[in-house]
Image (cartoon, grey):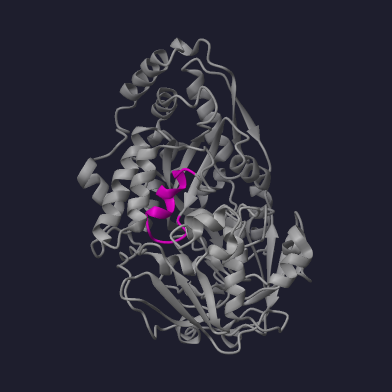
Amino acid sequence: MKKTKLISAMLLAAVLLSACGGAKTVDGTKSGSDAASEQTAEKTSAGGSIDVQIGSSPETMDPALNSAADAANMILHAFTGLLTVDKNQNIVGGLAEKWETSEDGLTWTFHLRPDLKWSDGSDLTAEDFVYSWKRLADPSLAAPYGYDLLNMIEGYDKAANGDLDALAVSAPDSSTFVVKLSNPCTYFDKIASFISTSPVQKATVEENGDEWSTKPETYITSGPYKMTEYVDGDHITFEKNDYYYDAANITFDKIVFHLISDDNAAYTAYNQGELLLAKAIPSEEIPNLAGKEDFHVDPMMGTYYVSFNTQKAPFDNPKVREALSLAIDRNYVANTIMQGTYSPAVNFVGPGISDAAKDSQFAEVTKEKYGDFFNNDDYDANFAKAKELLAEAGYPDGQGFPQFSYLTNDTGYHKAVAEYLQDVWKKLGLNMTIDIQEWKTVTANRRNGNFDVARNGWVMDYDDPSNIINLFETGNGNNDGKYSNPEFDKLVEEARSTADVEKHYDYLHQAEQVILKDYGMAPIAYYSEFYLKSPKLQNVWYSPTGYYYFMYGTLAE
């Protein structure tokens, strides 16, 4: 297809991210206004207001509780952590202006910028990080990322059982934050740059409970913007935070995030000039948009997959999971249903994610070591094998298999994929219903295990394959299917605790093979990001981790 070739060429032109190194001493890195000045070098005019659409109503706007990309895109404009990421995906200083690690890689010391303030003008100190990181570990909060982000810190196990003071984070003075690890972590700087580790204001959170993040007057922020309006189902408005350390380089005075869940409504609003950027695009319009100036298809490090509730029969049976997975024609889904905007999955971890050697990719090393797990070019053989496996599991031609449901939301390709799965699994003799819910309800029910099979996907929060592989570790808050395998857990723990970068990646390769062979999920396709952006909106950027950065943007006059 001509359109597919065009999109593939666009993706091939993308620059790959560099591999991360081991834990080394870091001091005096370029950060803050230095990085910002480069990002705004070609500005035309700043100030004013912009209207954009990047998602529907979020389940939460709490940095510690969020695990969805759309809300994260808004939160990163309101909160800044110790470190942050620049336009070129380099880790740079955020609220910390410099940091260093000890020779053994176990102690990380962050030095905050002078005179930091919250958006209400009160002082922001290292004690705010102590509180916020302990809050992230608090079992009563049940933060989805708590385990994955903090379990390498000394005392995490005790903190996760309620003894929060056991977590080895401290503030020897108001401008110094110290973290002691139980084992070296080769990617801890990336954790310190991730939005969930941003500070939240203790007094506001504790006085207002769960509602603190939904009311402008209590949404006290540490980042470039503050919330001034929150109308659930309609819009969230952010205005410039004059107390932000880099406020002089923040351009737009106001950003209005329109919470539109209907693709047609977002598309119409964009075409009428009401939005300068729209992420929601009706799938039927994509063939007509390919090649147009304002239609963008960018690389995204992530995988679209199906989650099985492995704690419920019959999905606790690996043969059932394998049968359902092999019955999926990944080439058809990616190239026909998804119109070539995504690419068919052959393993779990997709392209663009780094490996140990400089400029290497995890997916390419997987192919060299293990080959492609899925042979997408022999679908007939895959489907025949699926029927055999279902019979071996005790359900010949689907006999005796209970009716089950597929949980999804109705945007983009999700409904079309659900209907395809319903049809192809029907050919196995299975009866599946489609349960379409509002997005924020989908995320809550999926996380709480209230599903049989569900659409799922993961876009990398930072460039290390552990970020997606560790999802399936026992106890991970984002392990929606509650998959558990001691061999897998051992490998990801070894990858986390080694100081040897090559071993770190090798353990993760082994772990990926375990989860694939166990069919802990069904990878379908590798993401790309497509969106409409007005040529008037300049100097904003999109990262392959799925984030849009508007804070240094300008409008063409």
Relative horizontal placement of residue 25, taking residue 251 as reference (left or right): left
Q: Position of residue 403 (x, y in %)?
A: 59, 19
Query: What are the residue bounds of the magenta stretch?
Result: 460-474
194 in relation to 8, above or below: below
User: Residue shown at 55%/27% (left/top)?
Assistant: 312
Q: Quadrant of residue 331?
A: top left
User: Residue shown at 33%/70% (left/top)?
Assistant: 23
Q: Residue 513 in magenta?
A: no
| Closest to the observer, 516 or 254 | 516
| Closest to the observer, 550 or 285 | 550
Q: Position of residue 2 (x, y in %)?
A: 38, 46
Give the total number of marks visible in the rendering: 0
User: Residue shown at 76%/56% (left/top)?
Assistant: 232
Q: Quadrant of residue 226?
A: bottom right
Asked whether residue 345 is in view, the answer is no
Q: Residue 461 in magenta?
A: yes
474 in relation to 552, above or below: above
User: Residue shown at 70%/76% (left/top)?
Assistant: 239
